[in-house]
Amino acid sequence: MSIHIIIDGYNLIRQSNRLSILDLQDIQLGRDALVDMLAAYKKVKSHRITVVFDGTRAPLFSQQRTRLKGITVIFSHKGESADTVIKKMARKERQGALVVSSDQDIVQSAAASGAATISSNDFEDKLMMSMDMHGFQIDQDDYKGWQPTTKKKGPSRRMSKRRRKNSAKIRKL
């Protein structure tokens, strides 16, 4: 079963060390770089990917919904926030969705709908790791890699059923 990854676009851009620098130069550069990264990821993993941006910062004469390099890009309507669009999509998709955002309001709403969630930073790490494993170029000084730990796992630390399902979806990334 393929996962529909729904991304809070500006949240991911502003949380990212790589993309936020481009965003400060020009907001369109940040959006384009994000779509390029996601297009490269889509070549590796065939998940359906949708990026949602606030329509107030949309380029002039842009459509509300477009498809760029296999990625669906949605700009919210005037008077509607990207958060609202993401929440609606999560309610519609339910367990077939993975919502990428660090906004706690979106995360709680998506989880209540049955969708899996992942923070923007964690998703970016998964994205970079996947691209690195499949030969795409990434800046090595930003990538931290695997961190050794002595933390023990076992039955006493078993996650709840909801968290286990969430983890199963995230492992598919």
Image (tube, rainbow, N blue to C red):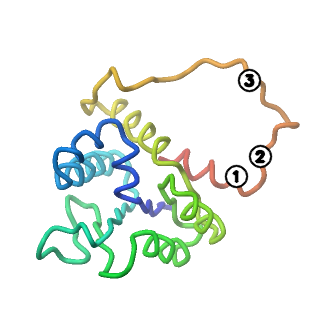
State if disc 1 and disc 3 touch (CB < 8 Å): no
Mark 3 Cα shell of 10 Å, populated few (<14), some (14-19), many (≥20): few
- Which residue: 26% across, 51% down? 39
Q: Say which quarter of the image contains residue 67.
A: bottom left
- Is 59 or 169 nearer to us in this picture? 59
Q: Which residue is mark 3?
A: 151
Residue 60, x across and y down, in percent? 12, 72
Drawn side of residue 36 relative to residue 113, left or right: left
Q: State the residue position of label 1.
A: 163
Label 3 – label 1 distance at C-alpha = 18 Å
Residue 89: x %, y % from top left = 47, 74
Residue 31, placed above or below residue 55:
above
Which comes before the other along the chain, label 3 or label 1?
Answer: 3
Residue at disc 3, secondary structure: loop
Q: Are marks 3 and 2 in contact (CB under 8 Å)?
A: no
> Closest to the observer: 147 or 102?
102
The earlier-in-sequence mark between 3 and 2 is: 3
Q: Which residue is mark 2?
A: 159
In the structure shown, which secondary structural element does the residue marked by tag 1 occupy?
helix
- What crowding class fits label 2: few (fewer than 14 Cα within 10 Å), some (14-19), or many (20 or more)? few
Asked whether, in this view, residue 70 is left or right of residue 99, the answer is left
Instruction: Please tell me which residue is depicted at 41% across the width and 33% down the height of the picture.
Output: 129
Corner quadrant of residue 68:
bottom left
Which amino acid, by three-letter code, is at mark 2? Met
Q: Residue at x 38, y 49 (%)?
A: 45
37 relative to 160 in the view: left or right:
left
Per the image, label 2 sits on a secondary structure element best described as: loop
Q: Nearer the viewer, residue 45 or 68?
A: 68
Q: Nearer the viewer, residue 38 or 84?
A: 84
Cα–Cα gap, marks 3 and 2: 15 Å
